[in-house]
Amino acid sequence: MVAGACRGNMMAIEVSFSEPARTLGARVKQAQRTHSHEDGGNWSGPGPELSEGLKEEVRAVFTELSADFPLTPLPQWLDFASASIAAEEAWGAIRKANKASKAGKGSRLATPDLYRLHRLGTTLAELRVERASEANETLARVLGRLEAAPCSVSDLIRLIPQFICELGFSRGLISRVEGNVWYPELMYVVDDPEWAEELTRLGKAYPQVLTPGLFESELVHTQRSILARNVQSQTWRSHNEVAPASLTRSYVAAPIVSYGEVVGILHGERFGQRRDVDELDRQILACFAEAVRIALSRAALAEALEGAHLSLGSAARTIDRAVAAVHRVPSVSLAEAGTGTGGMQVRSGAAGLEARPLPDTLTRREREVLRLMAAGESNFAISRQLTIAESTVKQHVKHILRRLLVASRAEAVTRWFQAGGDDALS
């Protein structure tokens, strides 16, 4: 059930282009021009954000240490990654100085400088722990939102990219995988729905074959989450159209796995925050992807059970009418001799069981939809079998109810069986 559910989930949103795909190039270029200035400013490496006060403390400590040791100058734009690297370099210089001091070749480092460097290292470690704690709390909150979301496959797919951003990313993407082809489905961009729409259109217009060397090919092969760095310097390793158009520098991706096969991919990045993603981001998205797999499977199962419930309810009502007919006395009349009923003609008083052909106004496609409704299939399952959009199935169901003059799916299914079931297709 899980395999079929997850495999179908990624097809819930059908592409409907209102303009030719060839016009997308110009519109994406316009989006690039609009956002390219964000890539030209200072860009933070992975890790927690440093307060201005902590940045000043880092500069002060390394200014003092640089007077005694040949340290690499701090970058003008200071972030957690560069501060951590500088602290590690300083400790390396201290260890080297201590060895020289023991050998009588140098002086010992002043205790106050050691204390300040130690305190700085402790502060950086605490920041890392604090960020991990906050990320776990955020994940728990978003998982609660996922659990409370509508139990519908199509609704979940529309919400998941937004939930990815609620985890702390500035852009979220959900895709499906079929065979060796990656199909981007829907992207969400914080505070920029127009760019999200453009990138979604571009991804849908150009599915990406998972060739060797792609980050996503590695993900599908290993069935494990990935962290992709330096994307703009190697765009050939990601989506050939979306990667350069999105200007992304780094991102994390996690697979949706069902029965040993990758059926979907989640992506998250921090472009809008001008920050690179890190290992913690990868772990958080991987946990969320597993929850998404369970939520999609649950939604698909709920839709299938709803369809079965409708069919069983219709069958129960038909049986009730049949049982009631057993206790009715049929009307009889003398018939002409030579009939196959021994000279009598029998007419059942159970009018509800009489054959009733379907109206000629039902199209061939509508009869196929009605047949699948009678088999207990949900609208989503019908869309998969007939290779049409779920919204198209809903429209067919409305037409069927109107043309059969019935008020519910159950009544329509009853009419199907009264018309002879599969014989009604001919």
Image: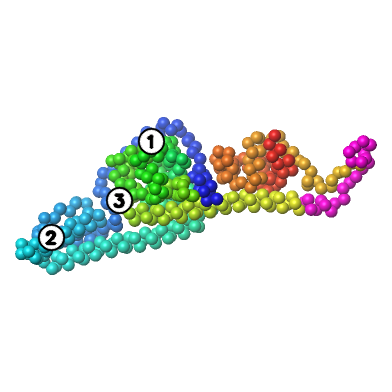
- Could you tell which of marks 2 and 1 lies nearer the N-terminus? 1
Residue receiving disc 1:
27
Magenta span includes 324: yes
Q: Which residue is mark 2?
A: 96
Q: Secondary structure at mark 3?
A: loop
Q: Is residue 64 visible?
A: no
**Viewer-nearest of labels 1 and 3?**
3
Front residue (pair 385, 19)? 385
- Could you tell me how far apart the alpha carbons at marks 1 and 3 are, in whole angstroms? 25 Å
Question: What is the number of the mark on residue 275?
Answer: 3
Residue type at mark 2: give it. Answer: Lys
Of helix, strand and loop, which one carries label 2?
A: helix
The magenta region covers 321-343
Residue found at x 63% / y 43%: 372
Q: Quadrant of residue 217?
A: top left
Point out the image quarter for the C terminus: top right
Q: Disc 3 marks which amino acid?
A: Arg
